[in-house]
Amino acid sequence: MNLLRKLTIISAAALMLTSCGGSKKNNSEKSAKKKVTIAMVNWAECIADTHLAKVALEAHGYKVDLINADVAPVFAAVAKGDANVFMEVWSPITHKPYLDKFGDKIEKLGTIYKDGRLGLVVPDYVTINSIDQLNEYKDKFDGKIIGINPGAGIMKITQKVIKDYNLNYELVTSSEAGMLASLKKAYDQKEWIVVTGWKPHTMFAKWKLKILKDPKKVMGEAENISTYATKGWAAKNPEAATFFSNFKMNDDLLGSLMLAVEAAPGKEDQAAKKWYDEHKELVDGWFKKQAN
């Protein structure tokens, strides 16, 4: 083999290696851009929305990781960039302390649901209708309001309700699952119980419940549930950001999604995927920029 031919082969091999290396680098960069980490809390609507987002993004070529924590560490994770997105920000009241604290490090992508409501919830057979009647029936409720995880915004607001209405009640720390178990047990036995609740939630589809009137408006009125991301993330991930910006739910859509996901414990992705397949045209449309 002459020298010229040897040099030609070596040059070609070097070019191939360089090209492959460049291709691997480009693929790696592309792969990095197609990864999304979504933070979530263990609330029914958040679990449902997050798993729907996961399966929809995966269907469009994304690698999606989920991290699960209480509200405070979730906000901190998104602010720091350890998570990219959180789909359960309630405003203007519930999560105001976190928005005030982390507002310069996170950015709003879009509003998912526009009729979120917080309240103290009782079974429909309970004969009172307002928070200001609770003290009169303290014994019937065993002097307890059954709450959820301590970092939740609704817990802080309920403490303010207890103070502002001068309620002689204990706010019991639990979890959403624990609160629902207590509610089901009391409901099945037709016992009186008051819990921290919110809408949207599958509890209203399962049982006949009512939100106690709040004459002092301590718990506010209708709230928005929105998606927030780490500041600057949307500009670097325009397709995914568009999807989250367009992600919208009404009572019928969210109710059916929550019930489907809740009915498949441990198989939330499968339930969300089935719902996605049944609403594919709608969900895939969220990846496209929409006219204002």
Image (cartoon, rainbow, N blue to C red):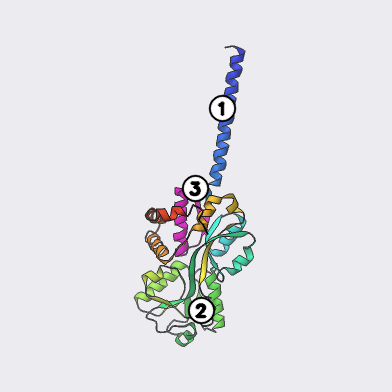
In primary-sequence order, the first of circles 1 and 2 is 1
Query: Quick one: 152 or 117, which is closer to the camera?
Result: 117
Separation of marks 3 and 2 at Cα, in angstroms? 46 Å
* Front disc: 3 or 2: 3
Q: Position of residue 242 (x, y in %)?
A: 53, 54
Q: Label 3: how many residues lie within 10 Å, few (<14), some (14-19) or many (20+)? A: some
Tell me the residue that label 3 is attached to.
62
| Residue 16 tag number | 1
Residue depicted at x 41% and y 53%:
281
Where's residue 222, x and y in %?
50, 72
Q: Is residue 6 above or below residue 251?
A: above
Cα distance, mark 3 to mark 1? 29 Å
The disc placed on residue 84 is none
Q: Position of residue 287 (x, y in %)?
A: 49, 52
Amino acid bearing label 3: Tyr
Q: Position of residue 170 (x, y in %)?
A: 51, 79
Pointer 1 local density, CA inside 10 Å: few below 14, some 14–19, many at least 20: few
Q: Which residue is mark 2?
A: 170
- Disc on the earlier residue, 3 or 1: 1
- In the rendered view, would you say 148 is above or below 142? above
Amino acid type indicated by mark 2: Glu
Residue drawn at the location 63% of the way across and 65% of the way down? 101
Left or right: 161 in relation to 140: right
Is residue 23 inside the magenta stretch? no
Can the viewer see residue 144 in this picture? Answer: yes
User: Start and end of the magenta stretch?
Assistant: 37-66
Name the outermost residue toward the top: 2
Task: Name the kind of residue labelled 1 in the image.
Answer: Met
- Can residue 269 be seen in this snapshot? no
The quadrant of the image that shows the N terminus is top right
Secondary structure of residue under mark 1: helix
Find out whether residue 49 is within the magenta segment: yes
